[in-house]
Image: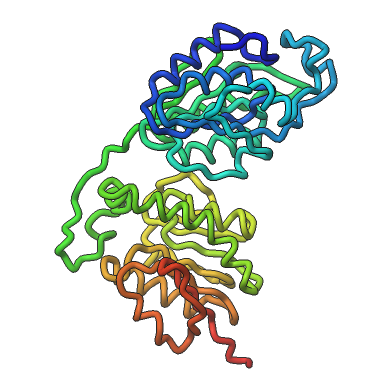
Amino acid sequence: MNNNIPGFTNQHKLEIIARWVEELPDNINAVEVGSYCGRSAYTISKKLKKNSRLTCIDDFRLPVNKDAYNFVNIPVGYIGKNSKENLLKYLEGCDNVEVLVGKGTDYIINNVGFVFIDDSHFNPDFKDNLQHWWKQLSVGGILCGDDFYEYSFDNKKLDVIKEVLKLANENNVKVEIEQHLWKIKKLKKSVTKVLDFTSNIDYVDQNPSYMDELYDINPEFFEKWFVWIKTNLHKILKMYNVPEGDIIQAGTWNGIVYDEFKKIFGTDRCKGFDIVKYINDNSIIYGDFRKTSLDYNGKCALFYNGLGAWDKNKNSKEAGLEFAKKNLVPGGLYLDVIHHDNSILLDIPELKYCNTYDNKLIILRKIDDRL
């Protein structure tokens, strides 16, 4: 700990943070969102174990008005000194630290075992950070932050308590509180194993929550897929002219891919379908897609068939393909995942093959009969 670094975190809180970091294993990535001059970052850096690294993310836009600092013991001379240069100066000697400029939600980091959020405590920023880093947090990892109390600033009430408790309740985990610091540990879900991999019955008809079961068997496969999607989906879709209309994903599961569509096209355009309520999202219709999709009467500009693999969920995948053929507007895009054999997608009269990317994603376009 280095109390010579200006900041908002007192000695007692630094000791608590240090104890939490000491719980972590080797070889993890830690993240701090909202680092200011590095008071807590210094402690995290020094307590991380072998082959672990800390990424500090800050937009360095703390208010420079002295009145904004009246509730903490910050010397006047330090007001406004929140910059990347000052942070690096105070963290000199912390060789396991990288500093990134921007919002926490701007970045994707793999193998995250610890996240400390001390950025904006007001929505939508706080909620966005919370959800963004919870999704990236590895099983067994710690998500934590400061200012878990009822407090109003500039006549606005902090959203920390409300959002942290909501996240904990949705994921059936406990919130630990010490000196207004909050901590949530991501636990491994209890997954019921019921799939018969030799059966011809669709996975979804054997176990509606089959995606959790598959993830439990091979998490590394899915984590690599998430990274690929976050890295490539936007770049790929920028090459296409996507017409006006709804952006639909069938099989939203944990929402990671669905969130990317929202970022690219905007929340208002996106609609999702899933048989299980994995996440709370009012834009997702929950139920068997083979039935719920029959009520759709809109104009679909892009359809992502995320209903599993063709060889394991044939009935559901066919329902998704038929939906696209019927509801895609002329020029609309059909996206599907490459699993083992997607030859079924290469000879469809209504859809023209466009391209395959990294042997992972295939894109087809609805033929425009008017041309």
Q: Residue at x 34, y 53 (%)?
A: 221
Number of numbered callouts drawn: 0
On screen, residue 278 above or below 314: above
State the colouring used for the structure image. rainbow
Using the image as rendered, state which of residue 124 and residue 104 is in the foreground.
Answer: 104
Q: Is residue 111 above or below residue 39?
A: below
Q: Answer whether residue 60 is visible to the viewer in this image.
A: yes
Q: Quadrant of residue 7?
A: top right
Q: Is residue 124 in view?
A: no
Q: Position of residue 342 (x, y in %)?
A: 35, 76
Q: Quick one: quadrant of the N terminus?
A: top right
Q: Quadrant of residue 85?
A: top right
In the foreground, 215 or 16: 16
In this rendering, would 296 be left or right of 265? Answer: left
Q: Is residue 186 left or right of residue 11?
A: left
Using residue 304 as the reference point, say whether residue 83 is left or right of it.
right
Residue drawn at x 60%, y 16% is: 149
Q: Position of residue 61 (x, y in %)?
A: 76, 31
At 38% across and 72% down in the image, what residue appears?
319
Name the spot of residue 255 as percent of width and height, x first.
47, 50
Q: Position of residue 117 (x, y in %)?
A: 57, 28
Q: Establish if 151 lies above or below 216.
A: above
Up-down relation of residue 130 to residue 176 (above or below): below
The front one of 184 and 277 is 184
Where is the C terminus found, in terms of image quarters?
bottom right
Residue positioned 32% across, 53% down in the render: 211
